[in-house]
Image (cartoon, grey):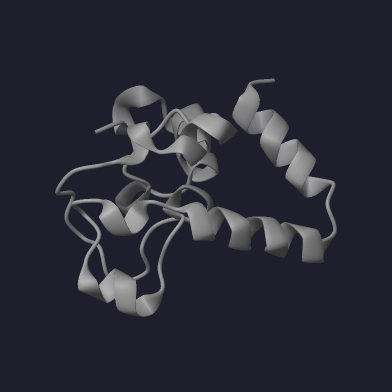
Amino acid sequence: MDTFEQTMADVKKKSPKEQADLIADFKSKCPCPGCPSYNTCAQKAGEKLFCVTGKSFMCISEEKGCNCPQCPLAKQVGLKYKFFCNRGSEMAQRYEHTIWGASLNR
């Protein structure tokens, strides 16, 4: 089990309130607003923490750069992918790569 899998297992053991508090804490530390791909639409919609919550709903459609590899949260929870705002959460990308293989990696 790698760091991400262990983190998700630990989160799963928490109560729904504790999980919500943890997500709120992660969002407060989230550097997404400083990313080149982040835009005004995402800001107005309050979109953040794409690595956990998944793709931008309707705001980010173009990859202009990615700060995820330098994100302290990414290192803390053991993320191995990037461009979560366009490609989906870490969990979603791991699932897709398990099912379809590495050919989906852009």
Give how far across and how far down residue 77 sits, in percent. Answer: 58, 34
> In this image, 39 relative to 16: left or right?
left
Task: In the rendered view, tell whether residue 54 sits above or below residue 97.
Answer: below
Give how far across and how far down residue 33 sits, in percent. Answer: 31, 59
Q: Residue furthest top?
A: 1
Give how far across and how far down residue 96 sits, in percent. Answer: 46, 37
* Quadrant of the rendering where the C terminus is positioned: top left
The image quadrant of residue 18 is: bottom right
Give how far across and how far down residue 71 sits, in percent. Answer: 40, 38
* Quadrant of the rendering where the N terminus is positioned: top right
Residue pictured at 30% horizontal, 26% vertical: 103
Nearer the observer, 94 or 3? 3
Does residue 53 appear in this view? Answer: no
Nearer the observer, 96 or 50? 50
Q: Residue furthest bottom?
A: 44
Task: In the rendered view, tell whether residue 79 sits above or below residue 16.
Answer: above
Does residue 21 appear in this view? Answer: yes
The image quadrant of residue 22 is: bottom right
Nearer the observer, 21 or 41? 21
Residue pictured at 52% horizontal, 60% vertical: 28
- Counting every numbered tag in the picture gives 0
> In this image, 17 relative to 43: left or right?
right
Residue pictured at 63% horizontal, 21% vertical: 2
